Amino acid sequence: MSKEIEKLLASVQDQPFLLILDTVQDPHNLGACIRSANAAGVHAVIIPKDKSVGVTDVVKKVACGAAEVTPVFQVTNLARTIEMLKSRGIWIYGAADNAESTIYHQNFSGPLALVMGNEGFGLRRLTRDLCDFVFKIPMRGTVECLNVSVATGICLFEAARQRF
């Protein structure tokens, strides 16, 4: 699969803009994330094969056509894929609710992959450790966190705002 990702990266004419979803399990969330990724101009979505929902009929329905036009790569080893992306000069930004820095202090203008975590426990430890930068979305209300698809939309469009 990494050969397919490398082929896609070679064809990208501007700075790569990727979305990595670390073990998202709800098909509605995955579909919404793919739809937002397409709307924000993401070149590809990367998901692990294990402990993650695949591109099912429900995912396709929720994505409203975006799953058919946005490349989605299911990889066997997410950590190895992240390391490959880093070796190609792509900065890895992870979202975590307990990060020190906020999304508004990040520079998303270069080649990047945004990493979003699981609905219940967020980023896995190894995935978080592989991130070059970890940030949070500041919360002002009483809820502790956002739905992963909502958080993904916020992060993607902040990156898109800086990039375009």
Image (cartoon, grey):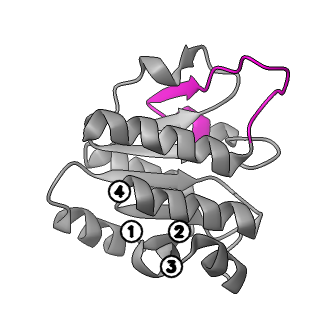
Q: Are marks 3 and 4 in contact (CB under 8 Å)?
A: no
Q: What residue type is labelled 3?
A: Gly
Q: Do the residues labelled 2 and 1 touch (CB within 8 Å)?
A: yes
The part of the image, by quadrant, that contains residue 121 is: top right
Look at the numbered disc 2 and give the secondary structure of its residue. Answer: strand
Magenta stretch, main secondary structure class: loop
Q: Which amino acid does label 2 sit on?
A: Val
Return the disc, 2 or 3, that comes first in the chain's sequence: 3
Return the disc, 2 or 1, that comes first in the chain's sequence: 1
The segment highlighted magenta reads 127-146
Q: In which quarter of the image is the C terminus?
A: top left
Q: Quadrant of the N terminus?
A: bottom left
Q: Find disc 2 in the rendering and name its residue.
A: 75
Q: What residue type is labelled 4?
A: Gly
* Number of the label disc, if any, that sits on residue 2: 1
Q: Find disc 4 in the rendering and name its residue.
A: 41
Q: How far apart are marks 3 and 1 (CA)?
A: 25 Å
Look at the numbered disc 1 and give the secondary structure of its residue. Answer: helix
Q: Nearer the viewer, mark 4 or mark 2?
A: 4
Q: What residue type is labelled 1?
A: Ser
Q: Where is residue 116 in the image (x, y as percent from the top left)?
A: 60, 45
Given residues 84 and 10, the one toward you in this image is 10
* Number of the label disc, if any, that sits on residue 65: 3
Q: Distance between the residues labelled 2 and 1?
A: 8 Å
Q: How far apart are marks 4 and 2 (CA)?
A: 21 Å
Look at the numbered disc 4 and give the secondary structure of its residue. Answer: loop
